Image (cartoon, grey):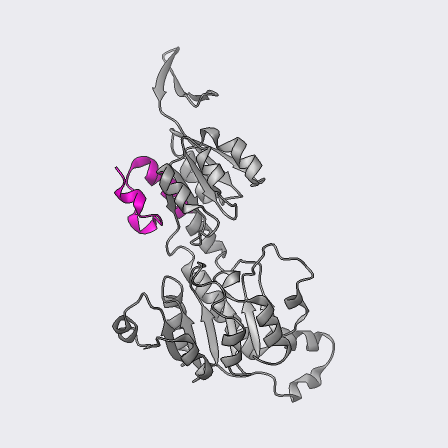
Amino acid sequence: MRLLLVFSNGFMAKLRWNLNVWEVENMNQYKVLMAGPMPKAATDLFDARDDVVYEAVTDVSEQNLLEKMRDVDGITVRTADITAKIIENSPKLKVVSRFGVGYDSINIPALDAHGAALTIVGTANSVAVAEAAFYMMLELAKEGFKHDQEVRKGNWDYRLGMHAIEVWRKNVLIVGFGRIGSRVAPRCAAFEMNVFVLDPFVDDEVIRAAGYTPVSNLNDALPDMDYVTLHLPLSPETRDTIGAAELALMKPSAILVNAARGNIVNEDALYDALSSAGIRGAGLDVLAVEPANKDHPLFTLENVVISPHIAGVTSEAANRMAVACAQNVLDIFDGKVDPENVVNKAYLTAD
C-alpha cells in the first residue's frame, strides 16, 4: 500500500507500508494548475508521476489565477489571459503550456523576465484546422447549409436555381505556410485547385518545391484569387491584414476563410463587403471578441459560416493536444523539452 501526503507548503512525502511499518520517502513536488478543462489524456500523464500534483479550475479570471498561482510550477492554458501581473506573482512558475498553438493571450516579455517557458503543441491540431478551413471553402462554394434549410421547408424547387460553384481549377491564396497552411495546400491541390502561397518567412524555392506558386505581394495577388484562406499569427503587423482596401480588390465571387485569429480581418469592413455583394462569402472560426455577442452584425448575414473557435478541436486532435500540452510541462520539469515547442527562445539560451 502507498499513500501520497501533500502539505500546504508544497512538500510531499510518499509513504509505503512495508512489513507492518510505514516507510517515508521524501521527494520534491511539482504543482500544475490546469486553467480550463483538459482531456483525460493530459491528467493520465500527470497521474503517472509521483512527483506531480495538479488542480483544475474553470474560473480563469486574473483575480482567481493570482490566488491559485502562488505555489504553482506549471500551468496549462486554454483561453485564459496570462498577464504580467499573474506571472510576476508566481514565484515558482517554470512553464506556461498552451493547449493549442496561438499565444496572443500570454505576456511573453513577462515570461522572459521571469525565466519561464511558453510552450505550444506543435502540429497536434494542424490537420484538424486544415480540414476545417477547407471544409469552409467547400461549404461556402456548395451552399449545403442553404440547400438543407430549403429542403426542410419543402422547397424542392430550390434545385432549379444555380446556387453552387466549384473549386476545380479555381485560384486559392494561402496566406501563411506554416504548420497549418502547409497542410491546407495539398488538400486544395487534391481538388485540382491552383494553389498560391504568400509567406515572407518561407523561401520561394521551398514553396515551388512543394508544387505551389509563391506570391510576394498580397494586394497584387488578391484580384486574381477565388479563395483566400488565412493561417498566420496575430501581431501588430498582421492586425487588419484584410481590411476595406483588401476586400475591395477581391472578386465579387471570392470566398474568404479565417481560421487564424479574429483581428487579422477587420470585421466592420468584412460586414460591409458581405452585405453589399463585395465578396461571395466568408468562413470564420475566429472573431475579434470571443465569446462573441449574439447580436454581432455578421450573425445577421446568410453568406457567412461561423464556428466558435473550434477548428482545431476534433476528438482526435484534442487528445493529441492534451498529451503534447501535458508532456511539455513534464519535459520542462525534467529539463528535456523539445525546442520546437518553445515559443520564447530566450528561455532555451538562459543560464
Q: Please name whichever residue, 338 or 117, is drawn nearer the observer in this view of the structure.
A: 117
The image quadrant that residue 64 belongs to is: top right
Q: How many labels sit on residues?
A: 0
The image quadrant that residue 309 belongs to is: bottom right
**Magenta segment main secondary structure:** helix
Kindly identify the residue that appears in the image at 28 percent across and 76 percent down. 208
Q: Which residues are magenta?
A: 323-351
Question: As displayed, is residue 141 above or below residue 47?
Answer: below
Rendering coords of residue 97 (x, y %): 42, 44
Rendering coords of residue 133 (x, y %): 48, 68
Rendering coords of residue 268 (x, y %): 60, 68
* Placement of the N terminus among the 4 image quadrants: top left
Q: Please name whichever residue, 149 or 308, is drawn nearer the observer in this view of the structure.
A: 308
Q: Please name whichever residue, 251 or 13, is drawn nearer the observer in this view of the structure.
A: 251
Q: Is residue 339 magenta?
A: yes
Kindly identify the residue that appears in the image at 44 percent across and 63 percent down. 238
Report the side of 148 relative to 215 (left or right): right
Q: Is residue 311 magenta?
A: no
Rendering coords of residue 94 (x, y %): 37, 36
